[in-house]
């Protein structure tokens, strides 16, 4: 057994407070960019430790710097924002919050992606690392990031002086709770989460009365043809050995039944594990959109706007090898190989800004009986709640224990605990 495994398995630091913190966070979710109460709660917890608090940064971001002599610097990041989802878990601490959404309409708000668990686990890791200073040396950075769900928070922290206000880490870490047997710590080298972009496409047309289509250039028809043609890009232009997703999220056109509108709008969501594939697909999307507009006689050029960019989450092989050895020692047979996931997130923007290697992993959070039954019945897709669903709720005990100890173990691997 490694020194880190012995330290984490034999520690006497009380972590029972995590449950009340988690339930409070879960009951009080806040949308991206509005995490004021969450920010205050995290700062209040961090003030219990011997650390320097950098706050606010990048909106409602918080960074805690734990210094313990000379040595390496390791950063661990947790995200803190919720989603515009009305909760349906039925637990006593379920969110009943309603807030204005991006369009101004009132929406339910829920921690439907597990960021409440991420923040709770990192606070627990702060307690473990702060309480075991005789076992490590260097600098530990705990970073609590806002606005992950809209892919703006990591960049906002960088633009708000993260690189000058916080020491450069030699290595960065992050994790995400996802469907899987609760307590499993799933790691892999190379691509873990996909790169992503959203594309807003404005298709110009010419309006006319609905009874006179010959006087119009119908952008709704063009948009429909674009949607059909987009389906052929992945199916007919991408090597089957590669991976790409092009999904049409929204199609908007018109305001009433008897007017052909002057324009239509499509919003796409695209994901990749390879930048060369991404470039080819984006060129094909532009070609299809422009060609369909020309085919219908539109003289004005369509507009393509890229937003909600997420970098490829590409784990450093050397960091993986080093940390996986620790995880195997700490977690035994629940330290397992991960599969790459098609979801995306903005964590990588932080280590990329610093020029630091990183490792990002997945923590299984599905209750054992639910997961095992679904696997046995080949019904995982149907019977296991996934992130962003209104019934998503991690199995608390197994998940918080694994996530807390994984965060601490990864950091201690680089801060000389061995």
Image: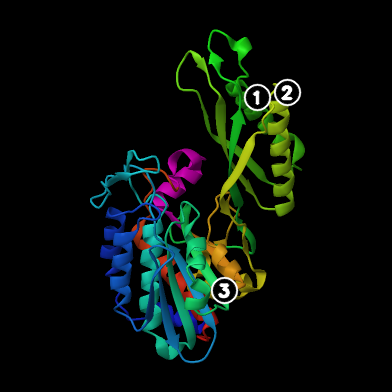
Instruction: Please report whichever mark, 2 or 3, sits nearer to the chain's N-terminal start.
Output: 2
Q: Which residue is drawn at 46% across and 71% down?
A: 407
| Residue 366 part of the magenta-drawn span | yes
Instruction: Please report whichever mark, 3 or 1, sits nearer to the chain's N-terminal start.
Output: 1
Tag nearer the camera, 1 or 2: 2
Q: Which of 78 and 290 is in front in this view?
A: 290
Residue at the spot of label 3: 323
Instruction: State the image coordinates of residue 181 (x, y, percent, origin top left).
Output: 46, 55
Q: In this view, does 145 lie above or below 255?
A: below
26 relative position to 218: left or right: left
Residue at the spot of label 2: 295
The residues tagged by marks 1 and 2 sit, at their Cα atoms, a distance apart of 11 Å
- In the rendered structure, find residue 195 and report the number of the disc placed on it: none
128 relative position to 358: left or right: left
- Please provide the residue range marked out in magenta: 364-386
Q: What element carries label 1?
A: helix
Instruction: Please report whichever mark, 1 or 2, sits nearer to the chain's N-terminal start.
Output: 1
* CA neighbours of label 3 inside 10 A, class few (<14), some (14 to 19), many (20+): many
The residues tagged by marks 3 and 1 sit, at their Cα atoms, a distance apart of 49 Å
Instruction: State the image coordinates of residue 130 (x, y, percent, origin top left).
Output: 38, 82
Answer whether labels 1 and 2 touch (C-beta < 8 Å): yes
Q: Is residue 46 visible?
A: yes
Residue at the spot of label 1: 225
90 relative position to 82: left or right: left
Q: Which residue is drawn at 23% across and 50% down?
A: 92
Q: What element carries label 2?
A: helix
Q: Nearer the viewer, residue 377 or 158?
A: 158
């Amino acid at each position: 057994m490694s020194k880190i495994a012995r330290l984490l398995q034999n520690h006497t630091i009380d972590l029972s407070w995590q449950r009340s913190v988690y339930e409070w966070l879960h009951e009080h979710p806040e949308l991206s960019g509005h995490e004021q109460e969450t920010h205050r709660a995290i700062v209040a917890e961090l003030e219990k430790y011997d650390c320097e608090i950098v706050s606010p940064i990048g909106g409602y971001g918080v960074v805690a710097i734990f210094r313990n002599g000379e040595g390496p610097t390791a950063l661990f990041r947790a995200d803190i924002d919720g989603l515009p989802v009305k909760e349906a878990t039925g637990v006593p601490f379920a969110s009943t919050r309603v807030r204005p959404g991006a369009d101004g309409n009132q929406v339910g708000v829920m921690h439907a992606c597990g960021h409440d668990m991420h923040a709770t686990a990192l606070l627990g890791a702060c307690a473990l690392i702060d309480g075991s200073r005789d076992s490590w040396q260097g600098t530990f950075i705990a970073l609590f990031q806002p606005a992950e769900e809209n892919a703006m928070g990591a960049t906002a922290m960088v633009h708000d002086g993260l690189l000058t206000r916080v020491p450069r880490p030699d290595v960065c870490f992050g994790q995400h709770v996802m469907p899987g047997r609760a307590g499993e710590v799933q790691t892999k080298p190379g691509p873990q989460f996909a790169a992503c972009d959203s594309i807003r496409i404005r298709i110009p047309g010419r309006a006319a009365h609905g009874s006179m289509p010959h006087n119009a250039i119908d952008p709704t028809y063009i948009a429909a043809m674009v949607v059909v043609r987009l389906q052929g890009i992945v199916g007919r232009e991408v090597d089957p050995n590669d991976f790409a997703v092009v999904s049409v999220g929204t199609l908007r056109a018109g305001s009433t039944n008897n007017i052909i509108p002057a324009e239509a709008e499509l919003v796409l969501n695209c994901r990749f594990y390879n930048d060369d594939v991404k470039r080819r697909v984006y060129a094909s999307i532009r070609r299809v959109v422009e060609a369909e507009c020309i085919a219908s006689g539109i003289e004005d050029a369509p507009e393509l706007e890229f937003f909600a960019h997420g970098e490829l989450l590409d784990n450093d092989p050397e960091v993986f090898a080093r940390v996986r050895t620790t995880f195997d020692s700490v977690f035994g047979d629940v330290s397992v190989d991960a599969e790459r996931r098609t979801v995306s997130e903005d964590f990588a923007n932080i280590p990329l800004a610093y020029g630091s290697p990183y490792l990002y992993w997945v923590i299984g959070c599905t209750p054992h009986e639910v997961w095992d039954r679904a696997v046995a019945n080949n019904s995982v897709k149907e019977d296991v709640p996934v992130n962003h669903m209104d019934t998503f709720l991690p199995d608390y005990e197994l998940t918080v224990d694994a996530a807390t100890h994984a965060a601490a173990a990864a950091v201690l691997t680089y801060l000389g605990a061995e």
